[in-house]
Amino acid sequence: MHHIPATITAEERDALQPMLALIRHPEQLSIRTMSGEFFDCADHALMAFQIWRRMGRNNEATGEAWRRLMQSDCPTPDVMALVSFYVLRVMHDDQWGTP
């Protein structure tokens, strides 16, 4: 199967930009999984980004899907902050190199 990288439009990037401010301390989003593996902010962000893509880039549907999957009450803006982190930090760093 051929993998086509996700592309983000300028409009999507602009809409996600303000949400990045909700993640003040990415290092505080690190946990150990049930199997003892390290799971950091970038891992959470990738998961949120993939859910966002799967939900047709619909913010509300993404928040609802996250809450069902994680069995949590995480507000949609917080989930979208993770999507924003992935788009504006992880994808950017992968494309341009870590500043």
Image (cartoon, rainbow, N blue to C red):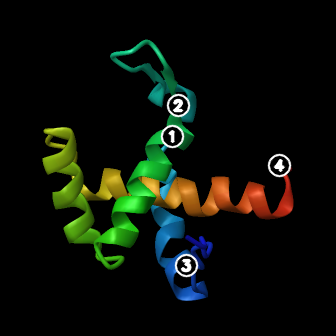
Q: Which residue is mark 2?
A: 40
Q: Which residue is mark 4?
A: 98
Mark 2–mark 1 CB contact (< 8 Å): yes
Q: Earlier in the sequence, mark 3 or mark 2?
A: 3
Relative vertical location of residue 2 with respect to residue 80 in this rendering, above or below: below
Q: Amino acid at mark 2?
A: Asp
Residue 72 numbered mark, or none: none
Q: Which residue is mark 1?
A: 43
The quadrant of the image that shows the N terminus is: bottom right
**Real-space CA distance between mark 3 and mark 2, rounded to the nearest whole angstrom:** 25 Å
Q: Which residue is mark 3?
A: 14
Q: 10 Å neighbourhood of mark 1: few (<14), some, or many (≥20)?
A: some
Q: Give the number of the mark in front: 3 or 2.
A: 2
Q: Give the number of the mark in front: 3 or 4.
A: 4
Q: Amino acid at mark 1?
A: Asp
Relative vertical location of residue 72 with respect to residue 10 in this rendering, above or below: above
Mark 3 secondary-structure assignment: helix
Mark 2 secondary-structure assignment: loop
Residue at 39% across / 20% down in the picture? 33
Q: Nearer the viewer, residue 23 or 69?
A: 69
**Real-space CA distance between mark 3 and mark 4, rounded to the nearest whole angstrom:** 21 Å
